[in-house]
Structure formats: structure tokens, C-alpha cells
Image (tube, rainbow, N blue to C red):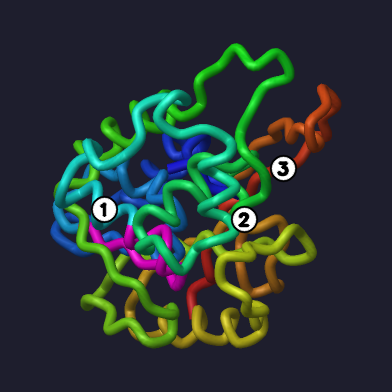
């Protein structure tokens, strides 16, 4: 699923670190977004949660029904169709809104603008359809939940990955709530004491969290060819 802040490109690096020694314990993708990391997790028990009802509805729908309900190319679904959905969200179910609002929007950002290239050569609708079909097959064994992270009843001794909204960066507008970082840090400390293994993607964390992996990558700026260098990091909480 096209989603702002997707970790698909680094999944192959961080999943082996997080899944080391997991056995039959659960891997919990607590802020799963578009499900782009959990689809690659090679473990027995997988749970994915997000507070965003549109992304979860989409993932549950393709998991259950496949992708045949989606538009297959840009003749079936035009920019006029996109704009109509954007202005009449109340007429559509959450799964379809999740597809249009994220997969068919520029940068995977909630109803940002229709995905297009400058020459109009790429069929982004067809690309999104093919990607959804692929993802549907890779999510068959995942349990999905739509909840805030604090309210989930976690399996015992879970391995928990938290791809939180990065501090001081762009916000995810599909759910209009500010993220309480201090509250989250304290939640991590409590869950670590309860026996869970906690992993967090962020640029920076408090001193009692340790960076266990990092990698530079380029971020494209808006619709131009310029880019900036950023450093993706994976943290865990120090032994308490």
C-alpha cells in the first residue's frame, strides 16, 4: 500500500534484527500504516495495528476479497473520479477511501493530489492495482486491528515494532490527532518491564533508548529532482 513514511525499502535490513530469536512469540507491527513491513515478516504469529481506519479497512478488504473490486487502469478511474471521491467521501466505504486516499495520491499522503507524471505516460491506477494484488497474497496470515497503541491487549512477550510519526516532520492527516511523544516513551518503558521487546523507527530518541541500526537514504523533495540525505535509525530500549 502506498503510504507516507512506508518502511518497505528498509524492511530487509531491520526485520532480521527484530525477528532474531522470536520463535513462536508474536511480532506486532503496532503502527502498521500501509502494511508494507509486516508483509515481509517471516515468523509464525503476526499482528498488525493502526489507528487509521482507512488503511486498516483497505488491508482487511484485500486480505479477505483480493483486489478485483479495485479499478484496474486510468480509463476505469480518471482524475475526475479521484476528485469526486475526494469531495464526496461520505458516499464511499473506508476500504475504497483508503485505496484512493493513499494508493492513488501523490507520495501516499492522504488525498494530497492525484498521482501523475509530467508527461502522462504512467498508468498509476494500473500500478496500484497490481501492487494491491501482490500485497493481498502476502498478508494472508496477518491479524489486523484498528486501535490506538495504548488500548491493545498485547500477546505475552511480544516483539513490538513501532513506526511512529517522526517528531518534527509531516503529519498524517487521515487521523487528525497530535501524537504525544512523552506518553509513548513512557509506554515503551512500561512494556519493556513487562517482558516485551520494543523497537522504534525514529531519527532521535531519549537517552535510555539505544540506536541498533542506521542507514543513510535520499528523500526526494516535492515534485522536483532535488533530494536530501536522511538517516533512518532503529532504536530499542535499554535493559531496565
Tell me whether circle 1 and circle 3 mark residues in contact (CB < 8 Å): no
Q: Which mark is residue 211?
A: 2
Magenta extent: 46-57
Please tell me how crowded label 2 is: few (under 14), some (14-19), or many (20+) other residues with Cα within 10 Å. Answer: some
| Nearest to N terminus: mark 3 or mark 2 | 2
Identify the residue at image location x=35%, y=35%: 71
Q: Is residue 145 visible?
A: yes
| Nearest to N terminus: mark 1 or mark 2 | 1
Identify the residue at image location x=52%, y=63%: 236
Q: Which mark is residue 96?
A: none
Q: Secondary structure at mark 2?
A: strand
Name the quadrant containing residue 36.
top left
Q: Horizontal and vertical percent for residue 164?
A: 57, 65
Q: Is residue 7 visible?
A: no
Please tell me how crowded label 1 is: few (under 14), some (14-19), or many (20+) other residues with Cα within 10 Å. Answer: few
Q: Horizontal and vertical percent for residue 235?
A: 57, 59
Q: Which mark is residue 231?
A: 3
Identify the residue at image location x=55%, y=51%: 84
Q: Horizontal and vertical percent for residue 194?
A: 35, 85
Would residue 190 be counted in the magenta stretch? no
Q: Up-down: is 115 above or below 59? A: above
Q: Which residue is mark 1?
A: 21
Name the front one of labels 3 and 2. Answer: 3
Amino acid at each position: 500500500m502506498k503510504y507516507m513514511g512506508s518502511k518497505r525499502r528498509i524492511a530487509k535490513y531491520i526485520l532480521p534484527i527484530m525477528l532474531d530469536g522470536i520463535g513462536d512469540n508474536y511480532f506486532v507491527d503496532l503502527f502498521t500504516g500501509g502494511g508494507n513491513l509486516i508483509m515481509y515478516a517471516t515468523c509464525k504469529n503476526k499482528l498488525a495495528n493502526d489507528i487509521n481506519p482507512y488503511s486498516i479497512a483497505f488491508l482487511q478488504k484485500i486480505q479477505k476479497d483480493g483486489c478485483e473490486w479495485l479499478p484496474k487502469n486510468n480509463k476505469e478511474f480518471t482524475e475526475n473520479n479521484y476528485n469526486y471521491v475526494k469531495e464526496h467521501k461520505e458516499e464511499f466505504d473506508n476500504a475504497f477511501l483508503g485505496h484512493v486516499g493513499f494508493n492513488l495520491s501523490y507520495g501516499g499522503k492522504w488525498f494530497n493530489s492525484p498521482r501523475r507524471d509530467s508527461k502522462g505516460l504512467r498508468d498509476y491506477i494500473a500500478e496500484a492495482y497490481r501492487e494491491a494484488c501482490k500485497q493481498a497474497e502476502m498478508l494472508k496470515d496477518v491479524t489486523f486491528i484498528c486501535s490506538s497503541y495504548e488500548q491493545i491487549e498485547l500477546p505475552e512477550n511480544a516483539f513490538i515494532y513501532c513506526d511512529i510519526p517522526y517528531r518534527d516532520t509531516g503529519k498524517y492527516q487521515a487521523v487528525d490527532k497530535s501524537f504525544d511523544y512523552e506518553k509513548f516513551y513512557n509506554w515503551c518503558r512500561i512494556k519493556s518491564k513487562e517482558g516485551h521487546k520494543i523497537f522504534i523507527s525514529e531519527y532521535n530518541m531519549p537517552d535510555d533508548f539505544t540506536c541498533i541500526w542506521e542507514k543513510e537514504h535520499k528523500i526526494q523533495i516535492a515534485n522536483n529532482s532535488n533530494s536530501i540525505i536522511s538517516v533512518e535509525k532503529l532504536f530499542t530500549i535499554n535493559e531496565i
